[in-house]
Image (spheres, helix red, strand yellow):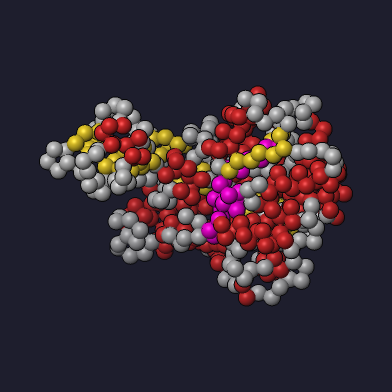
Amino acid sequence: MRGVETRIQEIRHRIFREAARMAYHTEWPIDKRIEELPYKIIPGEVGNFRNDVFLERAIVGERLRLAMGLPYRGAGDPAPVSDGIEAADRPETYYTPPLINVIKFACNACAEKRVMVTDGCQGCLAHPCVEVCPKDAVSLDRTNGKSRIDPEKCIKCGQCAKVCSYNAIIIQERPCAAACGMDAIHSDENGKADIDYDKCVSCGMCLVNCPFGAIADKSQIFQVIRAIQTGERVYAAVAPAFVGQFGPKVTPGKLRAAMKQLGFADVFEVAIGADLCAVQEAEDFIKEVPEHIPFMATSCCPAWSVMAKKLFPEYADCVSMALTPMTLTARLIKKQHEKAKVVFIGPCAAKKLEAMRRSVRSEVDFVLTFEEMAGIFDARHVDIENMEEDPDGVNDASADGRNFAVAGGVAKSVVNVIKERYPDKEIKVANAEGLKECRKLLAMAKAGKYNGYLLEGMACPGGCVAGAGTMQPIKKSQAAVGLYASKAGHKTSDGTEYVKELEKLVE
């Protein structure tokens, strides 16, 4: 639903804006303010989104807590919204698991999967739905000639839906579960959605596909602003998928100016880290495949790499050990600027999970999504589209580095580096988008179908531009990133000035 301003997007934006305002208005006692906010966001006697104003306010209260980085509480927990609020005001409050949370009393308790005959059934003479059902679950209502399905017999195979000439039989699936490529979502004892965190990789696809807005992730909006206020030198590392996210007229120069107005020390484009990642993966591929490992999987997408290690542990060594663009950019910033704090700003929920790892924490201090960043801009009334350009723009990254944001871009960048450095080497590539397809790709690799290949996986269909923290239509984002990449000063990743820093960053 990215690019469609639904009620869910509206309420999320309000939550992020108010979390930012609580940080900026230091004269407000945050415990008192957070108690008042549900009444400010949902005013009056009548609900705006649901039929119960008290339920709406309770949901808003939990959303506010998650936006402050605090744990979710169920409806049975008798505690004020401000319970434990002091934890949000500690320096560098990291995301504590679970990152993705189901607000149970906002969940509609959707059926996991069901096959239904709709009013579109014409009671036709052929009734192929009856003929193809392997369990005799479809029968005729003799009074009107229409089909009906016995849910006790139905195995939900969908054969009846496929043969209906009128498309009058539909298959309904719980949207969050259908979007989850890890099969991590099931029903609890009350029929509400429940996440199996042993399976979850925090890609956030359930979050953006729940039409009731019952799934939310934690944020560090408050902590980022507080760090800037205390005088820390906070640098923004912005993912190349930012193009168009803050408005069609927002150029890299305007974004840089806006970030500096908010108090950021400077802005770096994560595409420079993507260039470094591509070079490192290219060298790793040449050294490792096929002499030491049968194939190599890219490391850029954290949800993809975590999924590979969870479901195919025997092939964990086949996932590239190259540092991700986020981590490489953070290391570069901290190498150049002593005592710097780094906030990664991007499209991805799983990057929050990546930053929680002990090996990454020393590099990346905070993670925000584009959607959360938009809430900060709104809280400070920053009109980015009408700002004066910062003449320095963002950074001198390559076209291939910027194209990391689009599915297929990572593998292409690595291949282009190999072609430049090893022109006689032929590279075979396979890629997949969405974790369901990624799992199929790795299953085929396990079966020996992709020996000698470079495999690229993206948890989000379309690539990083389709991440859970994005706000514009995916196709539009892909086109915008392509246009932006075409304006880069370098074509391939090994042509930028930052490549010479790689050995110092990975030693």
Q: Quadrant of the C terminus?
A: top right
Instruction: Determine the image quadrant of residue 448.
Output: top right
In the displayed structure, would residue 496 be above or below residue 191? below
On the image, the x and y values in percent for residue 385 come to: 61, 72
Start-end of magenta stretch: 454-474
Question: Would residue 482 appear left or right of 421 to someone viewing this image?
Answer: left
Residue 368, magenta (yes or no): no
Residue 459, magenta (yes or no): yes
Residue at 21%, 33% in the rendered image: 139
In this rendered view, identify the residue nearer to me: 221 or 271: 271
Question: Would residue 43 appear left or right of 3 to someone viewing this image?
Answer: left
On the image, the x and y values in percent for residue 375 come to: 55, 62
In this rendered view, identify the residue nearer to me: 186 or 474: 474
On the image, the x and y values in percent for residue 498 come to: 83, 52
Instruction: Determine the image quadrant of residue 378.
Output: bottom right
Instruction: Determine the image quadrant of residue 286.
Output: top right
